[in-house]
Structure formats: structure tokens, C-alpha cells
């Protein structure tokens, strides 16, 4: 493989190949313990999203501060994900995962004990940074320890976990907060986290550490990468909410992002042992898979964000009601996983991705007809299509990106691959929020032009509302005008949501048109499957 040849011989030699396990049962059980750890790490991205109001009240935080409970986790995690490839080569898969799962569990406990918003932000950042190492390590292990013939079973499992966890996060978070308290959003990780940490320590023996790599560790590259990715994540998260460069901090961090990015890319191509080996993108399959993963991040995180915002702001749903409604997508993913496994054996992955994108586009197109009255059953079919589309797409995308790389490149490539999905989600949320705000302003302006004293329908509606509030006496007219204004704002919001769903429909239809340009994946190189 041309991309493989680009790695210096000394670098290839420093990456120990996967070592055969004593029994396939032990290796499989160890892998599933790791998968559960990854599930917890991805789940915690979204588990707090439906319960931020309760956490805000519990910590006496302001509305500006509480968003950092989620933002700090995302920023820290996005820095660790590409770094994990280097660390797992240095420490070995076993010790990398033990430290990641153990640290994640301890920081979950610390989050539950937080009494101020500052403590919570620090603990959440550490939780995201340490736990983020579990995600790409599982992807890398799946494609190095199992032979190609087992991938139709393994790939749907990791695809299901990667997509199901953020989808059911608001559901689980809503239930825990409603039944117990917000502290249980974090306490729920303790017992499973201890189990994953101990079982990984006892069972995982996929490779050996290579501490000599620390001698050439690129600390400057790490600093540039942290500045680049951390500030990029912040700008994308906070920019749409703070009018982009009108906010001084967003402007400063944009400059930091550009400088950090230039330094990071320079070190990536000149350092003896770069933090992230970007030459993995020279492999055409990996580049294609990562590109589609980026767009799938928009579909995964963007829609996980849009549905709850609509249900909360327009329908007035509680966090528990939002969670129950969102459960439909999770159930659809779970039921589709075995179907995706079977199809991956028999169907061209490009055709399989096409089916998934069509399902996605159909679901978002249906949502473009959204009204203020849409409830569980109106949202049911679009959510089923979303869950089905995610799983049908994720399996071939995983296989295209990672399934044909040699074992010594998987660890590094897995970090890059998972990073593209998270960055896709961050970019998608920034575009979605900006579009929502812009379209809301446009629709408000148009509706206000229609609701004026020259329109008989508007006058009749206002008169009817004034009669309805006649018990308020002299304030009846004011109450009626306020109610009518709220109606106009709500309708403008619904119309802006419909516009975003239409935009996503165009995006997924565009991906279908790009599929013929992808080469059919080549078979995995000899030895790429690891031990049996």
C-alpha cells in the first residue's frame, strides 16, 4: 500500500504487531469490556444535555456558565482522541485503556461531588480528556485483533455503540435526573467503570509497550495540537451563540486556532515522531471513509441536538418527555445493527452507504414539513429512518476507512478517524445554530410584516384574544399583544427548524451523488486481522 510505504522504517519497527491471544474467548470478552468503556465515554457527551437546568440550579450557576459543563468535556475529548494513537503505542493498549477507564471513573465520581460550577468544569474537562482515549483504542483493537471474516459481526457492534450512545444520552439523563437527581448522571459510571478497568488490566494482552518512543515524543506538537483543536472546538460551539467575531474571546481563540493549526501541521510533517501521522490520509480509502465520517458526525450530533431543542422550545417538553421521544432512534439503531452486519457481507459498501443516505435524506425531508403541533407519532417515522440510516452507513464507513490498513497504522488512523466524526459534529452544530438564528430573524421579519393593523385576520385574532383576557381589565390588550407576539415567534422558530432540515436533506442527497467516485475497498493486507 502506497500510504504504508510513506512511514519511515524505524517508525514501523517501533510499533509492535498484534500478539495472538491464548484463547479467542478471552480476547473477545476483553474486547467487549473495552467496548462498554467506550460506550460510557461517548454517552457522557450527551447525558447531561437534557439535565443542564437541574445542574445549573444545583450548582447555582449562571446560564452562560452552565454550557461549559458540556463544552469543557468536548474540548478536552477532542484533544485526546488523536493523541491516543501515540499513547497506546508507548504504553500498550492494556495500560492506555486501564488509565483511561480508571481516570474516567474517578473523574465521574468527582463530578458527582462538585459543589461549584468551577469544580464541575474542571472535573468534566479531565473526565473528557482521560476518557477520550477509550474511543479510538476500541476502534483500533477491533481492526487489529479480529480477522477480516469476523468484521461483519464486530463492525456493527462498534458502529452501534458509537451512534447509539449519544442518541440515548438525553433519554438516560432525563430518566436519572427525574427519578433520582443530577448527581446520578455521573454516579452511574462508577461500578461499570471499576469493572471495565479491572477486567482490562487482567485480560487485555494485545500488544507490548514501547517506552523508548517517549524519547522522541513531540511535546511542541502536542501543545500546538491542543491549542488548535481546543480553540477550534470552542469557536464552533460558542461562535453561533455569541455573534461570532463580535465576541472578543471568540476572536482571540480564532487567532489561537490559526496559529496552533499552522504549528501543528508543520510539526506533523517535520517531527521525527509526530503526535499524529497525517500521512494516513494518503490512503484513498481512509480519506474517503474519514470524509464520510465527518458528514455522518453532522447527522449524528446535529439531529441529536435539533430534536430536543424543538421539543423543548416549541412543544414545551420536560427532559424526561424529550428522552422518551428520542428513544425511537436508539431502538431503530439497535434493531438495525444485525441487519447491517448481514448486509456488509453481501452488499457493495458503496451501495449500502447509498441506502443509508437515502434513508437519512428521506427522514430529514419529512421533517421539513414540521409544524408546531408535531408530536411523538409525527416524529416517529423520521426518527426510525434516522436510526436505520445511521447504522446502515456507519458499518461500511468504518470498514472503508480502517478495514484495509495494515496493523501498524491502525492505532494512529483510528484517532484521526474518530476525530473527523467529532469535528463533523462540531462544524455541523455551528452551521445549524447559525442557520437557525439567521432564518429565525428572516421569518420574524416576514411574519411581522403580515401581522399588522392592515390585515383583518390579525385584527380579528387580536380582538378575540383581548376578549379572552378581559378578566385582566385594562391589561387585557397588553396580554393579547404579548400572546400574539409569542405565537409569531413560535411560528418563526418552527419555520427555521424546517429550513435546517431541508438543508440537511440537500447535504445527504449530495453524498449519494459522491458515492460513484469512491473506489471499491480492496481486501485487507495479509496479517491485518490479528490473531484468531
Image (tube, rainbow, N blue to C red):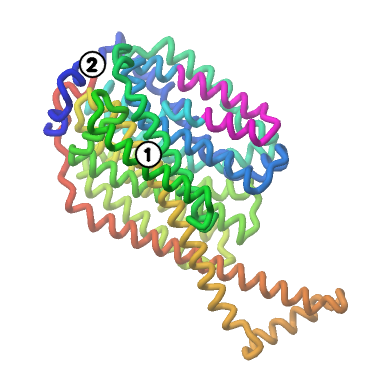
In the image, residue 418 lies at what x, y percent? 36, 36
Magenta stretch containing residue 396, yes or no? no
Where disc 1 sits, the SS reads: helix
**Chain-order first, disc 2 or disc 1:** 2
Residue ID at (56%, 32%): 124
Marker disc for residue 520: none
Task: Report which residue position mark 1 lands on.
Answer: 260
Task: Report which residue position mark 2 lands on.
Answer: 14
Left or right of 249 on screen, residue 138: left
Residue 360 visible in rendering: yes
Q: Are marks 2 and 1 in contact (CB under 8 Å)?
A: no
Quadrant for the N terminus in the image: top left
In the image, residue 316 lies at what x, y percent? 65, 57
In the image, residue 23 lies at what x, y percent? 31, 11
Q: Which residues are magenta?
A: 99-127
Quadrant for the C terminus in the image: top left
- Between the C-alphas of marks 2 and 1, the distance is 28 Å
Amino acid at each position: 500500500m502506497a500510504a504504508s510505504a510513506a512511514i519511515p522504517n524505524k517508525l514501523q519497527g517501533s510499533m509492535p504487531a498484534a500478539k495472538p491471544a491464548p484463547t479467542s474467548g478471552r480476547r473477545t470478552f476483553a474486547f467487549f469490556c473495552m467496548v462498554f468503556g467506550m460506550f460510557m465515554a461517548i454517552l457522557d457527551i450527551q447525558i447531561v444535555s437534557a439535565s443542564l437546568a437541574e445542574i445549573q440550579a444545583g450548582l447555582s450557576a449562571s446560564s452562560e456558565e452552565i454550557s461549559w459543563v458540556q463544552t469543557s468535556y468536548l474540548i478536552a475529548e477532542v484533544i485526546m482522541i488523536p493523541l491516543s494513537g501515540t499513547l497506546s503505542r508507548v504504553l500498550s493498549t492494556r495500560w492506555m485503556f486501564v488509565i483511561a477507564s480508571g481516570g474516567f471513573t474517578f473523574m465521574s465520581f468527582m463530578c458527582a461531588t462538585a459543589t461549584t460550577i468551577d469544580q464541575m468544569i474542571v472535573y468534566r474537562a479531565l473526565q473528557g480528556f482521560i476518557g477520550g482515549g477509550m474511543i479510538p483504542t476500541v476502534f483500533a483493537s477491533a481492526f487489529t485483533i479480529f480477522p477480516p471474516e469476523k468484521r461483519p459481526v464486530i463492525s456493527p457492534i462498534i458502529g452501534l455503540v458509537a451512534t447509539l450512545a449519544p442518541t440515548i444520552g438525553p433519554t438516560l439523563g432525563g430518566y436519572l435526573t427525574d427519578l433520582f437527581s443530577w448527581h446520578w448522571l455521573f454516579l452511574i459510571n462508577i461500578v461499570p467503570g471499576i469493572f471495565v478497568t479491572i477486567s482490562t488490566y487482567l485480560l487485555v494482552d494485545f500488544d507490548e509497550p514501547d517506552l523508548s518512543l517517549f524519547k522522541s515524543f513531540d511535546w511542541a506538537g502536542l501543545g500546538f495540537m491542543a491549542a488548535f483543536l481546543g480553540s477550534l472546538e470552542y469557536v464552533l460551539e460558542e461562535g453561533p451563540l455569541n455573534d461570532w467575531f463580535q465576541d472578543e474571546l471568540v476572536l482571540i481563540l480564532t487567532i489561537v486556532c490559526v496559529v496552533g493549526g499552522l504549528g501543528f501541521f508543520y510539526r506533523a510533517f517535520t517531527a521525527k515522531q509526530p503526535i499524529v501521522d497525517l500521512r494516513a490520509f494518503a490512503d484513498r480509502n481512509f480519506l474517503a471513509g474519514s470524509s464520510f465520517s465527518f458528514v455522518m458526525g453532522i447527522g449524528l450530533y446535529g439531529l441529536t441536538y435539533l430534536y430536543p431543542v424543538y421539543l423543548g422550545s416549541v412543544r414545551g417538553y420536560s427532559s424526561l418527555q424529550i428522552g422518551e421521544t428520542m428513544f425511537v432512534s436508539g431502538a431503530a439503531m439497535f434493531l438495525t445493527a444485525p441487519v447491517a452486519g448481514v448486509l456488509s457481507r453481501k452488499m457493495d459498501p458503496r451501495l449500502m452507504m447509498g441506502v443509508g443516505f437515502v434513508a437519512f435524506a428521506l427522514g430529514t425531508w419529512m421533517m421539513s414539513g414540521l409544524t408546531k403541533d408535531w408530536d411523538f407519532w409525527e416524529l416517529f417515522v423520521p426518527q426510525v429512518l434516522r436510526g436505520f440510516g445511521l447504522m446502515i452507513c456507519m458499518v461500511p464507513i468504518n470498514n472503508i476507512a480502517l478495514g484495509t490498513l495494515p496493523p501498524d497504522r491502525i492505532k494512529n488512523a483510528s484517532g484521526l478517524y474518530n476525530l473527523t466524526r467529532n469535528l463533523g459534529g462540531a462544524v455541523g452544530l455551528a452551521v445549524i445554530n447559525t442557520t437557525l438564528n439567521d432564518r429565525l430573524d428572516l421569518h420574524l421579519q416576514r411574519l411581522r410584516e403580515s401581522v399588522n393593523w392592515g390585515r383583518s385576520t390579525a385584527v380579528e385574532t387580536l380582538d378575540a384574544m383581548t376578549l379572552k383576557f378581559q378578566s385582566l381589565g385594562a391589561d387585557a390588550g397588553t396580554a393579547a399583544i404579548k400572546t400574539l407576539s409569542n405565537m409569531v415567534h413560535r411560528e418563526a422558530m418552527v419555520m427555521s427548524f424546517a429550513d435546517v432540515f431541508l438543508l440537511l436533506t440537500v447535504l445527504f442527497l449530495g453524498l449519494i451523488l459522491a458515492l460513484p467516485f469512491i473506489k471499491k475497498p480492496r481486501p485487507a493486507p495479509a496479517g491485518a486481522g490479528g490473531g484468531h
